[in-house]
Image (cartoon, rainbow, N blue to C red):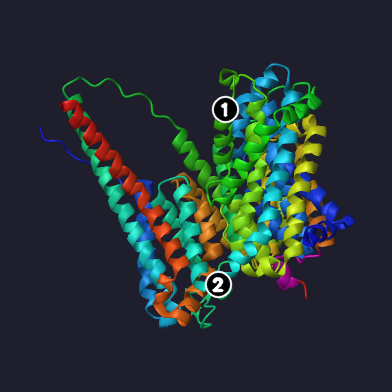
Amino acid sequence: MSSKKTLKLSSNMIFLLVVEALFAYLAVRTFSYSSVAALMPGIIIGFILLVTTILVVRELWLSLRKAGSDAAAEEEQTTVPEADPAPRETDPKVARMRELEIIGWLAGFGLTIYLLGFLVAIPIFMFLFLRIRFSTKWLTTAAITIGIEVGVYLIFIVWLQTMLYSGLIAKLFIPH
Amino acid sequence: MEQLWMGLISLISPVTLLYLLLGVVIFMVIGLLPGLSGPVGMALLVPITYGLGKEAAFAMLIGGHSAVMFAGSITAIVLGIPGTGLNVATTFDGFPLTKQGRAGEAMGAAACSSAMGGAVGAFVLAAAIPIMRPLVLAFGPPEIFAICLLGITTVAFISKGNILKGVLMGLVGVFLSTIGFNPITGSLRYTFNITVLWDGVELIAVIVGLFAFSEMIELFVNAHSISDREMPVIRGIFKGILAVFKNWFLFLRCAVIGTIIGVIPGVGGPSATFVTYAHAVSTSKNPEKFGKGAIEGVIAPESANDAKDGGALIPTLAFGIPGSTTMAILVAALLMHGLDPGPELLLTQQTFLFSLVWLVILGGILGAIIGLGAAGFLSKITTVSYKILVPVIVTISALGAVVYRGLFSDLIIAVVFGIVGYIMKKLNYPKTTLLIGLVLGNKIEKSLFVSTELYGYHFLFRPITLTILIILVGILLWPFVNSWIKKLKRINSRTDVGR
């Protein structure tokens, strides 16, 4: 029975291919610049493409080796009746869900800042995260939210005298 | 000598000393919090120091950072949890000492070693500054170009993951520095008609993204467990301090080793602590006691931990070559305050440089005093849940990303790099080399242009430049040569066995 080699695209391989494609595009763009402006990025992009290609080839070779050894192991096992497969661990799925969740929180926080400004977005974010998401006690939520808001005001506005971004809506409705 | 005292005098103002104290307290808290470290603290505080004078700003940053190592030691000794990666070696004997009821003794030894180790590193830095002056005068644009490349390559060589990944990230960092206005012709590159990219990718936003946002993403995803160990009674601190003086020769050797390791780009950090711990074991008359509560096992890594900072500042300040994440962020802070690390800083800002020497010493001493005094209270900070830590740090990070230029787009850059940084960590690509490439990129391009204008491509054959480039190629080829030598040895040994 011939072994079937299955090649899985690893996360690292996907990352490298994305980097390779991106810098191949940037290499084309570099030709539109003058020779002085293009010299440094051109050299750098050249080396990036070289190193990425080496890494892709290495990753491919390792994947083929792994696929080959997996296929050989599978071939041996087909002669033995298979037991019921053990239940899969859910940790990687949980991790993936949490990754998407935190990115969502960051994007949402960013959007709220863009629309309402820091001083309004911060207490909204803190309240939603602590109370709604994690059901933190009311007292703890209030203490931390108020503490952070007051701290931000005192440090950035009173002490450092920086202008915090006030949000798109404030800019539309409040005259300068 | 006069400049050394001038450096100290420049720090003697209530405001500067207050910022030093504030920096020490903030960094101590950061050093204790799970999931955070010195670079995260620097990434958060650098944007905040923008509005401060340079003495106050660096009192907060350098002085504070000198204290973070001891903060991590507190939890390493008392709870068996290293506060940072730099404190792992301290747990080997620190935590067993706590189990024997000698937590105070271990902490006294750690505090004294940290403070005095930092002083040794600082004095080496102070001694190196006048020696470096004639050396940097011999460095022209070709040598600066070569040494910048060497800095990136060395860090890539030492970093986690294979060397090619480190080199790739260094190159990507250098590429990112080319976005925006070309410093030579003034033309725009890779801006894609996005106005905010005309000034390039903002360094502070990248730092906040790579080292604060990405760490918070990881903290949230992994949902770090809370430490719930009971706090021991802290007694016998003075006995621990005396132990350092009793073992003064071991302390001095480890501090010097730590300083030397700190000088080499990319090697510092945990390497210094493990090397000195191994040194203490190998030179001890009773090596079997290590790992079971030997006070020397605390003195050795703690003295190296702080001493390495003085060493790391030498290439950073003299050549503008940062050898670690913290130093790269420090370079960003210097640039933000209008100080160009490298020959110019060394030649024109000697008083400021010596003030940094004193800040390393004062920060270490203050950190030790505060740490010892508040150890019981500070250790409770380790019980802070990630559910509270994440939104607080994300908020501070978001402010930090935006406060420097006041542009909302910097927050977008920070979030993007936060996600990129998280992916890089998962796939084992070093973030430090990317940051160092970004920090050095402009310098590399300018020195390349000036070198080619002055010497054509013959600049590559100038003696110092050529030597540095040969070392660079050697470092790149070494893993392959080493692997080939090992294969040959294996083949030879098989041949001998066959006979």
Q: Is residue A167 magenta?
A: yes
Q: Judge from the rendering whether residue B32 lies leftward or rightward of residue A9; answer left or right.
A: right
Q: Quadrant of the C terminus of chain B?
A: top left
Q: Earlier in the sequence, mark 1 or mark 2?
A: 2
Q: Judge from the rendering whether residue B31 lies leftward or rightward of residue B16; answer left or right.
A: left
Pinpoint the chain carrying mark 1: B
Kind of residue at badge 2: Leu
Instruction: Give coordinates of residue A154: x percent, y percent.
Output: 83, 56
Residue A92 seen in the figure: yes
Instruction: Give coordinates of residue B287: x percent, y percent.
Output: 57, 21
User: Dot 1 surroundings within 10 Å: few (below 14), some, or many (20 or more)?
Assistant: few
Which residue is found at the position 78% from the left and 36% from the top? B371
Q: Quadrant of residue B2?
A: bottom right
Instruction: Give coordinates of residue A35: x percent, y percent.
Output: 40, 82
Above or below: residue B218 compared with residue B126: above
Instruction: Give coordinates of residue B260: x percent, y percent.
Output: 59, 46
Q: Secondary structure at mark 2?
A: helix
Which residue is found at the position 29% from the left and 42% from the top? B485
The residue segment tinted magenta is A161-173
Kind of residue at badge 1: Thr
Residue extending farthest right: B14
Q: Is residue B39 magenta?
A: no
Q: Which mark is residue B283?
A: 1
Q: Quadrant of the N terminus of chain B?
A: bottom right
Residue A135 seen in the figure: no
